[in-house]
Image (spheres, grey):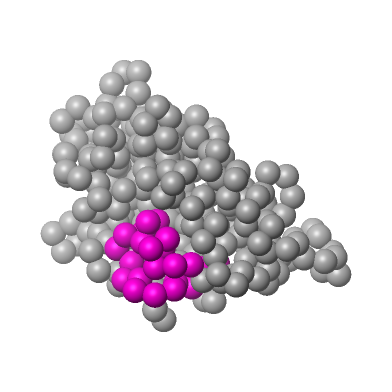
Amino acid sequence: MRRLSAALTVAGAAAVLVAGCSPTPSHSVLSSSAASTSPATVSSTAVAAPTSSSPTSTSPTSSKKSSEPLPDAAAILKESGSATAELDSVHLTMSVTGNIENLPITALDGGVTQVPDSAAKGYAKIAYRGAPAYVEFVMFGGDLYVSQSPRRWVDYGPADNFYDAAKILSPDTGLADLLTDFVDPEVSGRETIDGEQTVRVTGEVSAAAAKKIVPQLKASKRTLCTVWIQETGAHQLVQLELASGADDAVQMTFSNWNQPVIVGKPRV
């Protein structure tokens, strides 16, 4: 399966937005992994479109010897599914390639939580009036809030109309459910992704499971899916790729498992 590159570099946007865009004094909308540099304006370099020079570091082998037996695919998927179902929060980087209709958010970098309720915050590339916009976002209470300048937030209405990243940790309909839905999974190798030693599992998932993660996917039958799972330790899900057709795909990379993410409702 063709690999995708990770999409986002947020170093250029963090400080100018957080300086005046916190929803309340006690709730920061700055992602826990955002950089601390401070440009004067938000530019198109704040969130980069997918390119061949990915900020996600991958290598074809991990420190595990290539001669060592690979783990059983069904077993490691089950263990990863259990670990994912117990997550309270995670950092998500998402990129889109091709043309997925009705998916205006084509790149995203931010924190996701389900404590106390499902919410997300960070930075995104979003289609706006026919052109890409590079914005800070908050998904709270099922709605999407967007800011392009300090102290100015706009309520865009239901996040489902764009992409509701806050739902990916739902134990019933989120990533954990997807990991239990694989058909004929196969461990196809080892890779190191952003320092995490992983095994790559390939297979297919049902159209229903795929659309729970990305509702905008035109999945009408089993969908190709590849996941990268920590080979040892908690077996956390490190990366996944859903391919809908030859050219349309979504890649998500995960990190900072269970590190606190605090999201507040912006003032509009």
Q: Residue lying furthest top in this view?
A: 26
- Report the residue at 48% width, 67% height from top: 205
Residue closer to the observer: 141 or 177: 177
Q: Residue lying furthest bottom in this view?
A: 246
In the image, 230: left or right of 202?
A: right
**As drawn, 23 above or below 121:** above
Provide residue 250's location: percent of width, then percent of height. 42, 64
Counting every numbered tag in the picture gives 0
Provide residue 38's location: percent of width, then percent of height. 39, 37
- Report the residue at 86% width, 70% height from top: 67
Res 132 visible:
no
Quadrant of image for the C terminus: top left
**As drawn, 77 above or below 183:** above
Residue closer to the observer: 216 or 17: 216
**Extent of the magenta region:** 205-226
Provide residue 174's location: percent of width, then percent of height. 44, 50
Provide residue 1's location: percent of width, then percent of height. 54, 76
Q: In which quarter of the image is residue 184?
A: bottom right
**As drawn, 111 above or below 19:** below
Does the magenta segment cover residue 43? no
Q: Quadrant of residue 221?
A: bottom left
- Report the residue at 74% width, 50% height from top: 232
- Report the residue at 36% width, 43% height from top: 166
